[in-house]
Amino acid sequence: MAVQPEDIRLLSNPRFRRLLESRMLGQTAQNAMMYALLILVVEDTGSSVQSVILVAAFTLPGIVLSLPAGAAADVIPKRLTLTLGYFLRAVIAAALIYYSDDLVYIYLLAAASSVVLQFFSPAEAATVPALVRREQLTAANSWMLFILILGQIVGLVVMAPLLLKALDARAVFVACTALFLAATYVIGWMASGFSEYRAEKPAAPGFVAATREGFRILRHDRHVYLSTIYLTTAIALSRVLVVLLPKYTENVLNIQPEDTVFIAAPAAVGAGIGLLLAPPLTRLIGAWRIVAFAFGLFLLGLGALGLAVYVEDVIRGRFDLGTIDLGEETFGVSGSITVTMLLAIPLGFAFTLVSVASRVVMNQRAPPEAQGRVYAVQMALGDLFSLPLLLLVGIIADSVGVRTTLLAATAGGGLIAAYLTVSRPWGPSGRQRIGSEATGTP
């Protein structure tokens, strides 16, 4: 993945390798489970609003629990949090085997899974800087995101679609239960002592003080502030795309909702390219500069996806393709599918760069004992921003169409991010200016 030998040597770190192994199992299960739930809801109801309710059930707990969960991540032993988190998700996946026909239980179990993740995710993110050296943070975050993308490919593109076509959703939930239990075993046997510097840390603050510290870091460091804004907006818009994707494949591409692989697979290719380039680009240009560039590219890619049909018309009208077709004869797919697949590549590339570089900024600039709180603040803001946007998208999509909704959400997210970037009332209260550091390191 990474081009530096030092980055490859990260895999010789047994604790970090165990973290990656458990993450691979857990991400595969998590993505397969959410894919199966989304397809179940879409096929049973045919409504974008019901899809939004599912995503909202998964998002709402974050608004309430992200901040206390982040504070807990800096206090509770991380191995305990991760082990218990995987086990509880295995229990939830097992429950879905029996309640997959009931929408109410689907929503409740999705919410329960989100509650577990609120405590699990900050602990997992805060574990990385405790396991690797400071100069390895970029590569370590790239490995973590690489495993996330690989888990999405295996879960979303391979395991869930195959099991849904061959068997049914219950088979997906059985497989997810087994994978979560395997992740519980892997992380449970990790060597204890995630941080060898625990004895040197000050006493853990209370919840109010811990939460205030997370916001203080955000408000006094412009690089962390910008990274949080761009990552939060990108995550919110990616959730919008997830909600609209089944309808997009059905209404725009004229294929079945479960064939979202035509978008997910090329996006995963772009993500892989982003993971390859993230470490050297971050070293060369600086993490926060990569965040800004990649966020702009992500907005352009998402807008182009909404205009895919028109992009196809422009290609056919402006360029003489000669004997080259857009997939109709060569692959037996429509030109709009081919164009959408091509546009999904830079979209996945940009989202990956935003995710990797923003987390590097947070790791580099937040104190080690406050890592969980900073991530929790980012998660809480992401959920708070996502929920009203998703509810609005669900209503609009059934009224004006998927493409118009996607374009409106992209434009709205971009305008909000632009305003927050230049806003004095909402911006950082510190005096640090953009460009004060070329590398993004303290």
Image (cartoon, rainbow, N blue to C red):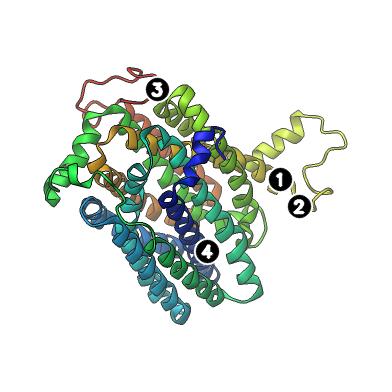
Callout 3: helix, strand or loop?
loop
- According to the image, label 3 marks what residue? 439
- According to the image, label 1 marks what residue? 338
- According to the image, label 4 marks what residue? 32
Q: Which residue type carries mark 4?
A: Ala
**Dot label at residue 362:** none
Q: Which residue type carries mark 1?
A: Thr
CB under 8 Å between discs 1 and 2: yes
Q: Residue at x 51, y 54 (%)?
A: 244
State how far apart marks 1 and 2 are (Cα). Answer: 7 Å
Q: Nearer the viewer, mark 1 or mark 4?
A: 4
Q: Residue at x 41, y 60 (%)?
A: 55
User: x and y percent of residue 360 in the render?
Assistant: 39, 36
Query: In the rendered image, which quarter is residue 171 located in?
Result: bottom right
State how far apart marks 1 and 4 are (Cα). Answer: 25 Å
Query: In the rendered image, which quarter is residue 415 located in?
Result: top left
Q: Which residue type carries mark 3?
A: Thr
State how far apart marks 2 and 3 are (Cα). Answer: 45 Å
The foreground one among 441 and 424 is: 441
Callout 1: helix, strand or loop?
helix
